[in-house]
Each structure stands twice: as C-alpha cells, then as structure tokens.
Image: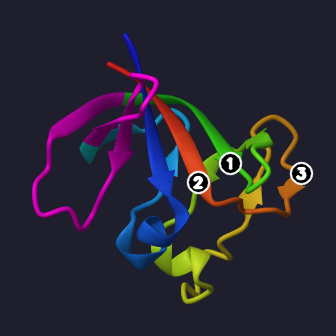
Amino acid sequence: MDVTVEVDVLDHMCCGETIERGDRVDLACTRRQDPDGRVRVTATHHASRVETWVRGRVVDIVSVAEDGSARPVLRIPEGRALRGLDEDDDGHLEAPWTGELVQDRGRTFVVTVRR
C-alpha cells in the first residue's frame, strides 16, 4: 500500500532530515480533511499531537511549485543543507534519472511511501 505524504518546505528547512528515494522512513504526521473529503497527510516536526506515523520505503518524491507544476527529484536534502548551512551538502535538488539540477525548489514536496 502506498501512502502520499506532503512535506512543507519551510517546516523541513527547520529541522528535517534527508529523505531519498529508496530510503526507509518513519515520518511523524498530521492529517486533515479537505472540503471535498480528501484526507491529506503532512509530515511534521512541530505538531503538538502526532496523529499518525508513516513507515516504509520511499518510492517517489516530487517538488510541487506554487503554480501546481510538479517535478520528480532524487531526494530532499536535510534542512540545514536547504538553508545553505551544511558544508558537506550543497542542498541542491536533482532529477532522479538524469542528475539534472532542479532550479525551482517549490513550496511542497510530495513523498510516496510504500508500506
């Protein structure tokens, strides 16, 4: 079973760890229901109440821009790297199959986890 988890860029920049395709993850998440009935699962580092944990292997990651366009990425760098504060990681995003740099970081990452 695949679960889609939204990762807010600003939340991740604070204290998120690297998430890469193929990694095993254990993500603390909150849930909310949209007016259309769809349930959204969002990774969190700051929620006072974790509503669910999503555990499994990462099978897909996309970066979603403000205009809704989505680009696949190999990994989400850890928060310090995204802020440009990690000497060992430049924090760039790259396409998973070509290594091409993805210029627009977007506002949200969508991570698909296979349980």
| Secondary structure of residue under mark 1 | strand
* Span colored in magenta: 31-56
Other-residue count near label 2 (Cα within 10 Å), few / some / many at <14 / 14–19 / ≥20: many
**In this picture, is 44 found above or below 61?**
below
Left or right: where 40 falls relative to 82: left
Residue 104 sits inside the magenta stretch: no
| Secondary structure of residue under mark 3 | loop
| For marks 2 and 3 on the same chain, the one whose residue lies earlier in the sequence | 3
Residue 41 sits inside the magenta stretch: yes
In the picture of the structure, the residue carrying the numbered disc 1 is: 63
Quarter of the view holding residue 66: bottom right
- In percent of the image, x 42 and y 68: which residue is there? 11
Location of residue 63 in the rendering, given as x and y in whole percent from the top left corner: 68, 48
| For marks 2 and 1 on the same chain, the one whose residue lies earlier in the sequence | 1
Q: Tell which residue pokes out farthest to the front in this image.
A: 35
Mark-to-mark CA distance, 1 and 3:
14 Å
Residue type at mark 1: give it.
Answer: Ser
Given residues 105 and 99, the one toward you in this image is: 105
